[in-house]
Image (cartoon, rainbow, N blue to C red):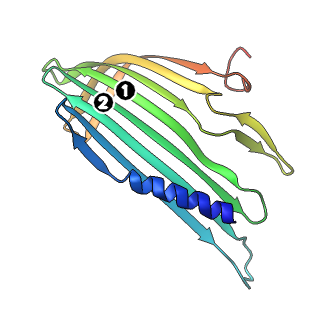
Amino acid sequence: MKWVFQRVLFLMMIAMIAMAQENKNESGWTYTMTGNLNLSQIALDNWVEGGDNAWSWQINIKGKVKREENTYKWVSSGNVNFGKSKIGSAESRKAVDEIRLESVYTRKLGLPVNPYAALTARTQFARGYEYTDTSGIAISDFMDPGYFTQSVGMGYQFKDSFSTRLGASLKETFTSEFPVPYADDP
């Protein structure tokens, strides 16, 4: 339990460093970052209606870099999310694990819709398991699979509150140790 407390304390310090910030420098880029740490615990004692002691934690950090000029808009964003949970006497298990990066370049033509090009990358931090009654079977790991998507098309944005894109895209899935079920040619 001591190592859990130390890791949670470390993650809390990271989250405090990543408090919501927005900075714009002379180059015209705007930087935004937010972070949060969620902790949850339940301890039952003399509870006759059943249930198990449990705890969970999750850390989420989101960042965005944006530059907008008269002729273009370029937005790159990232989201990292990781958490674990433990129920009863079972070992702690990964509850959420995601790394998502995206970059979108939009050329402004002065029309309601504008052309865009986008790149997206998605993977996870730690090894993932499919759990049976007796053990866990490894099914994924960092960049295994790794998803990469490229797209081009037309996009519409109404102020900063609503945007949508329609286009064509390509998606690549990279895997090495765990090709099934992620690859069509293992």
Other residues around mark 1 within 10 Å, as few (<14) / some (14–19) / many (≥20): some
Residue at image coords 71%, 63%: 87
Residue at image coords 46%, 52%: 14
Q: Is residue 74 visible?
A: yes
Residue for badge 1: 103
**Earlier sequence position, callout 1 versus callout 2:** 2
Q: Label 1 to label 2, Cα distance in Å? A: 6 Å
The answer to whether residue 82 is left or right of residue 44 is: left
Element type where label 2 sits in the image:
strand
* Residue 174 percent location from the top left of the image: 62, 20
Q: Residue furthest bottom?
A: 46
Residue 144: which numbered mark, if any?
A: none
Q: Residue furthest right?
A: 134
Q: Is residue 56 visible?
A: no
Residue for badge 2: 75
Under mark 2, the amino acid is Val
* Residue 133 percent location from the top left of the image: 84, 51
Residue at image coords 16%, 17%: 109
Between 110 and 139, the one lying in front of the other is 139
Picture quarter containing residue 161? top left
* Residue 78 percent location from the top left of the image: 42, 36
Element type where label 1 sits in the image:
strand
Residue at image coords 59%, 36%: 124
Between 115 and 2, the one lying in front of the other is 2
Under mark 1, the amino acid is Ser
Other residues around mark 2 within 10 Å, as few (<14) / some (14–19) / many (≥20): some
Picture quarter containing residue 104? top left
